[in-house]
Amino acid sequence: MVRTKKALHRAAFTLIELIFAIIIMSIAIVSLPMMMQINSDGVERGIVQEAIFAASAELMGATTYYWDARSTEDFNLSKYSRVVDVDGDCNADRQRLGHINRRCLDSSAAGGVNYTTEDNATFGLNRSVHGDETMFDSPEAEAAGYKQNYTSLMGIAQGLDINGLASNNVKVLTVSVFDTTPVLLTRLRIYSANVGEVEYYKRRF
């Protein structure tokens, strides 16, 4: 009687296992670029939000400036900004209706208001006006790991009153954020009124 030996416990892939392995590898190879694109887009959206937050911070910082270059013309009398008498509406006591403990400048000293041009001589709102400026430290977007740079543009103009008419006592600051296309991403505005500051010894906390 002749005995034959059978090959037992032979290690190998079956055809179905090989097919499944090929399918899984194909899915991974196809989906990897898509996943990388999604991750890249997520990073880019994040930096867009950072640009918008930076523009908002720029606006808030600008409002800490004096309202106008003439707001401190009596700096020898007070270090706080005063109400600029742009329409001659301050009374003989150098106060304007509705203002408490906020003195007007002498009408002869306030000969108009600068609404549109940049003014680097004083820390007034107009000092914040600028053309296209890169919003982040690195001038090259790729060096920071992003696809493009972002720039901001700050402008200033005369504001409007509640009736929609030009107001001599309101300034409006507008900051616009652009990408490299350039495409406008957002535009933020903030209004600043000619109200001066309260003298320190008259402040209440």
Image (cartoon, helix red, strand yellow):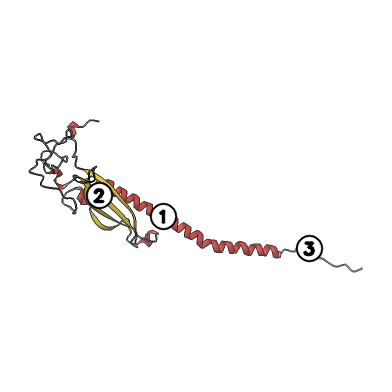
The residue most toward the right is 1
Label 3 close to label 1 by CB (< 8 Å): no
- Mark with earlier residue (1, 2): 1
Which residue carries the number 2 mark? 173
In three-dimensional space, the C-alpha distance between marks 1 and 2, rounded to whole angstroms, equals 25 Å
Residue 4: give x, y in percent of width and height: 85, 68
Crowding around mark 3 (Cα neighbors within 10 Å: few <14, some 14 to 19, many 20+) is few
- Total residue callouts: 3
Q: Is residue 13 visible?
A: no
CA separation in Å, label 2 and label 3 = 84 Å
Q: Amino acid at mark 2?
A: Leu
Q: 163 or 102, which is in the foreground? A: 163
Q: Secondary structure at mark 1?
A: helix
Q: Is residue 75 left or right of residue 60?
A: left
Query: Mark 1 touching mark 2, by CB under 8 A?
Result: no
Determine whether, in the image, residue 143 is placed left or right of residue 34: left
- For the C terminus, the quadrant is top left
Which is in the foreground here, disc 2 or disc 3?
2
List the single residue furthest toward the left. Answer: 108
Residue highlighted by disc 1: 45
Q: Position of residue 10 (x, y in %)?
A: 75, 64
Q: Residue at (24%, 46%) from the top-left corner?
A: 164
For label 3, the residue is: 8
> In which quadrant of the rendered view does residue 41 lie?
bottom left
